[in-house]
Image: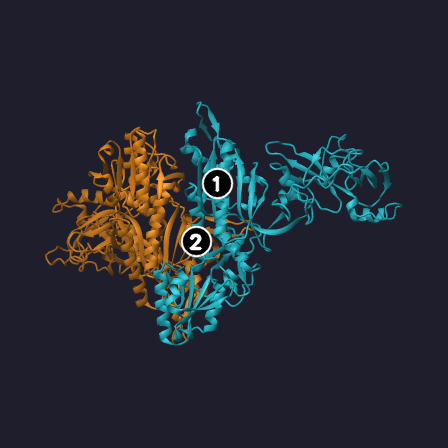
Chain colours: A cyan, B orange
Amino acid sequence: MISRMSSLFLRTLRDDPADAEVPSHKLLVRAGYVRRVAPGIYSWLPLGKMVLDNVARVVKEEMDRFGAQEVHFPALLPREFYEATGRWTEYGENLFRLKDRRGNDYLLGPTHEEMFTLLVKGEYSSYKDLPVNLYQIQTKYRDEARPRAGILRGREFVMKDSYSFDLDDEGLKRSYELHREAYIRIFTRLGMDYRIVSAMSGAMGGSASEEFLAPAPTGEDTFVQCGNCDYAANTEAFEGRPGTEIDASAEPAAQVYETPDTPTIESLVTLFRGFEGFEQTTAANTLKNVVVKLRHPGKKDPEILVVGVPGDREVDLKRLEAAVSPAEIELFEAEDFAKHPALVRGYIGPQALAEAGYTYQVDPLVVPGSSWITGANEPGRHAAHVVYGRDFTPSGTIGAAEVRAGDPCPRCGSPVSIDRGIEIGHIFQLGRKYADAFGLDVLGPDGKPVRVTMGSYGIGVSRAVAAVAEQRHDALGLVWPREIAPADVHLVATGKDDAVYEAAARIAADLDAAGLRVLFDDRRSASPGVKFKDAELIGVPTIVVVGKGLADGVIEVKDRATGERRDVPLAELVATLAG
Amino acid sequence: MISRMSSLFLRTLRDDPADAEVPSHKLLVRAGYVRRVAPGIYSWLPLGKMVLDNVARVVKEEMDRFGAQEVHFPALLPREFYEATGRWTEYGENLFRLKDRRGNDYLLGPTHEEMFTLLVKGEYSSYKDLPVNLYQIQTKYRDEARPRAGILRGREFVMKDSYSFDLDDEGLKRSYELHREAYIRIFTRLGMDYRIVSAMSGAMGGSASEEFLAPAPTGEDTFVQCGNCDYAANTEAFEGRPGTEIDASAEPAAQVYETPDTPTIESLVTLFRGFEGFEQTTAANTLKNVVVKLRHPGKKDPEILVVGVPGDREVDLKRLEAAVSPAEIELFEAEDFAKHPALVRGYIGPQALAEAGYTYQVDPLVVPGSSWITGANEPGRHAAHVVYGRDFTPSGTIGAAEVRAGDPCPRCGSPVSIDRGIEIGHIFQLGRKYADAFGLDVLGPDGKPVRVTMGSYGIGVSRAVAAVAEQRHDALGLVWPREIAPADVHLVATGKDDAVYEAAARIAADLDAAGLRVLFDDRRSASPGVKFKDAELIGVPTIVVVGKGLADGVIEVKDRATGERRDVPLAELVATLAG
C-alpha cells in the first residue's frame, strides 16, 4: 500500500493544542492522527485510523489464536438487563442514559457483562458446551467526570472485552491463564513496556485479578514493585508485610495525658514534645484511628469499622476499599459520631473499642508489641505507652495506610518502589456474580444444574494507541513500533528535480510490491526541512530519503528510533528494507 | 481458517422466531447469525460477525481503490453542530438525544454531514487540497418509529458513509461518478441483484441523486422500471410522461350540476351515472383537486398549492414532496379552509383558482384538451365538460398522482412495471448546503474564497447482509455468495467411524493450507440429518461430505446454490475446491 502525502488527508501542526497536557495527546493531534470533537470524544484521521486498526488486528489475532470467538453487541442497550444486576444505578453519573421515542430507558454500554451472560444463557444448556471464550472489539461509553489526556481516558473509546464461561474454578483458572498469555503476546507485539500487577476487584466482586500497566509518568494508576523479587501490585492491591513483633516488656504502663485542643496529629505531636520523655516524638509515634462505614452488598445497615494506621500516614481509602471489597466504604460523618458517643471524634483510641462492640483493625505497619500515643476515648485526652497486645488487640490487619516507596515487599521484605502506569489491560476471575444475577446454569453430567463461573478481560484498544505514544516518542515526535505504525517506510523525495520524484515513485512501487506499506512524501511544494520534520513527527519506523545521493546511486535510510543513518545502494534498498 | 462446529458458538433453531416477518430475519436468527436485544437492536454472533466483516472489507477495498480515505468519527456528538444545520430539530423523533453529566446535549449520529464538513474546514484551506473523498464505516443510530424486518431496518446499524469535497460542479460530478463506479463494483462483488434508480433528494436538498435498490418483495421502497428502455426511478422520483394533447373542439361547453352530498369521488361518480349522457362515467373521468401547504426553507409563511390528479388515483404525498423539495408539505386542515372561502372543501374546481390567486398544477396524466367532471367551487355543485386549455390553464405539471404499473415511461412511453426493493446504497450530489451552513471555503487560484461543493454517499453495511439474505435463500436456508460467506467450504464428517473424522480433519487442514476458510462439522453427537440440515441452513457455498464414500476414496461435493452433487476423488479434492 502506498499513501501519498500530496493527497493524504493530513495536516500536521507546529504547535501543541492548547488543551493537551500529556505527550501522546499533543503528538497525536500535532501529527494529524486524531482531532477533538468534544471533551473526551475524538475523531480518528486516516493515519490514526490505520494505527487503531493495527492495534485491533493484533488483539484479534491473539484472541483468535487461543480459540476465543468474536461477536459484536450493540452499544445501545435497554435498561432492564443492567437493572437486573443493579449496575443501572451503581454506575451513577458514569453511565450515559437516554430514552427512545416511546419513553423506554436505554444506556450506552460501558462494559457488557450482562449481555454476554444472557447470550450464553440463551444459547447453551449443557456442560458439554463449556468452556467458551467470547470477545468483541467495540465502541464503549463512560461519562467520565474529568475526561483527560486526549484518548488516554475518553468518554467514547474502543475496547476489547471478553468473557470466559467455565464449569468450575479449575476451568476458570485455565481460561484466565489463556487470556493472560494472550495479553502478554499482544502487549509484546504492540511494542509496549508493561508490568503485570496484582489488582483488586473493586466494584466487580471476585477473587483473582491482575492489571497490565504501561509505566508512564502520565499514568493515572500507581503501582508498587519490588526491587528484589518479582512482586508487583497496583497500590490499591498492595498487601503490606506484617512486621516482626516487638518486645514490649520494658514499656511503661499506659498513661493518660490532658491534651486539650489537639484534634490533629500535628497539634498532638507539638504538645507531646513539651512533655518530659517525649521530646523526640514524631507523627510516626502516634496511632491514628479512622472510622468508616462498610456498606455490604445486600445488607441494609452498614458495619462500623475502626482502622488504625501510624500517624505519619494517611488512610488510603481506595486501598481500604479494595481490601474490604465487595463492601463499599462510606465516610463516618458528624451525625454518625453523634449516634455513637463511645467514638470520641479526634480522641479515639483502640483501648476500649472491642468492649464497646466495634471492629478494630490495624494496618500491617502496626505490629504486635508496638507502643503508641493515641486517643484516650475522652474529649481532650490522649494516652501514651499504649501497647499492641497488652492494652489493645485488633481483630485483624487490613491494608489501609498510604503506601510509600521503601515500604517492605510483602513477599521478600526488600524495599519497594512506587511508579505511575497506564492501565492497558485487566484480567479478572469474576466468579458467579453475573451467573447468579441471571441464573446462568448448564446441566452437569449427572443431570443436575451447575452454576457457571465467569472471567472478564479487557484491553483498551484506543487507549493502547495513546499508551504506546506515551512510551514511544522523543522531542521530535512519535516513534511507532512497526507492527502498528501507519506505514513500514516513510519515503521522502526532496528537491526540485523531476528525476528524484520519478525514482522515488519507482522505489515506492517496488517497496509496495515487496509487501511494504509506504508513506510517500511526494509533495513538490514542501521544503526538505518541512518534510523531514513531518517524518520525525509522524513516527514511521524507517525513513528513506531520496535526494542528492541518487546521482551516486545511494539512498539514505534512517532509523526513526535510534536516529542512525546509513547510505544504501539503490539496487539493495528493497531487499534491505524488506528483510 | 478452520472453525469447528464442536466448539463454535452457534446454536441453530428449528423454528422461526415469533417476531420475524421477512425471510432474512427468520433465517439469520435460525442459522445463528444474529440475536435480538431490543426492537431494531441486534447482536452479531460469530458467523454473523464474519459476514458483516466480509461486507465491510469489500466496501473498504473498493473505496480505497479509487482513493477515498478512511476516517472514523464518534457516534456520540454534541448538539451544537447539528443545531447549526437545523437537523437537531429536523430529525424529530428519529434522533436519539441524551445529556451528559454536566447537562450538555448530545445525540447519537444518524449521519455525519456536519462532522465531515467541519473536519475538512478545519484541515484544508486551498483549492490545491481538493478534491478529497473521505469515508467511514461506522455504527449509526436512528430511532425508527417501526423498526422492522430484523436488521433490514434497525435502530443501531453499520453504515459506510462518505463525502466528496470539490471546487465546482464538474468536480462534484467526477467524485459522484467515482462513487457510482465503486458502488457498482461493491454490489457486484456482494453477489446482489440491484438496480440503479433515479432518486429525489428528500430532506437533503440538492440536484442529482441515485439509489441502489435490491429488488425484493420485502423491500420498503417501490421503484418504476421501463420494460423497453433502461429508465428506472424510485417511485417518488418518477417524472411522469406528458401526454399528447387531445382535440377538445367537439366538447360541449362546461355545465354546472347540482350535486349535493357528493364530497367523495365515489359518491360523485354514482350520482353522475344517473345523469343523461354520463351513464359510463368512472372515477377516471373526474378531476380531483387537492390543497397542500408548501413550507419553503427559510420562509415564514407557507405557499398554498392546489394539485389536480385524475379521480381514480390518490395523490402520492411522498412523490409530491420529492417534486417540491427542498420545500416540505403540510396538510391543508379544516382551519385553513375556514380562512380561504374561495377553496370550497370537497367541491374545488380549477376553473377559478388562478383568478383567486392560487397556484394550480396538474399531474402529467392530466393533458391539454382533456375534459373533466370536477368541482364548481360552490358547495353541492360540480361541473362537467371542464376542458384543460379552455376552461382552466394550470401553471405547470407536477408528479403527484400515485404511479401504477403500465403508466408510460417518461423516456420512451412504453409501459413501466413497479417493483419493491431494498435501498442498499444512495449517492447524492449534495451541493453547498452544508458548506454554506459552516462557511466551508478554500482559497482559489486567484486568492478569492471558493465555496466548496459536496457529495454524500451511503451504503448500509449491516443492511446489505440482510438484503443479500433476502435475495439469496431457498426453502432450506441461506445461500451466501463466496465473497461474503462465513466460510468457503462447509466440511461435514458423518457417522461414528473414527477414520472418517480423522480423514476429515486432514482434509480441513489441507483446505486451510490452500487458503480456504473451512467450517468443519466435527460433531460426534449430531446425526447426519442434523448436520446436513445445518449446512443447508447456514448457507456456505460448497458443502463437502466425508462419509461412506471415503472407503472408495471419493468425497461428495455439493453446490449449495444449485443443489448439484458430484463425487470427487480424495486426491483431487483440494485442487478442485481451491481452483
Left or right side of B228 for A406: right
Placement of the C terminus of chain A among the 4 image quadrants: bottom left
Left or right side of B68 for A94: right
From this viewpoint, is residue B406 visible?
Answer: yes
- Frontmost residue, A344 versus B275: A344
Mark 2 burial class by Cα count in 10 Å: few <14, some 14-19, many 20+: some
The mark that comes first in sequence, 2 or 1, is 2
Q: Position of residue A391 (x, y in %)?
A: 80, 34
Tags 2 and 1 on a common chain: yes
Q: Residue at x 41, y 33 (%)?
A: A122
* Dot 1 amino acid type: Leu
- Frontmost residue, B185 versus B531: B531
- Classify B548 as above or below A469: above
Q: Residue at x 48, y 55 (%)?
A: B79
- Classify B19 as above or below B114: above
* Dot 2 amino acid type: Asn
Placement of the N terminus of chain A among the 4 image quadrants: bottom left
In this figure, what is the number of numbered marks?
2
Mark 1 burial class by Cα count in 10 Å: few <14, some 14-19, many 20+: some
Q: Position of residue A37 (x, y in %)?
A: 49, 57
Q: Determine which of the numbered discs, if any, sits on residue A54 in the image.
A: 2
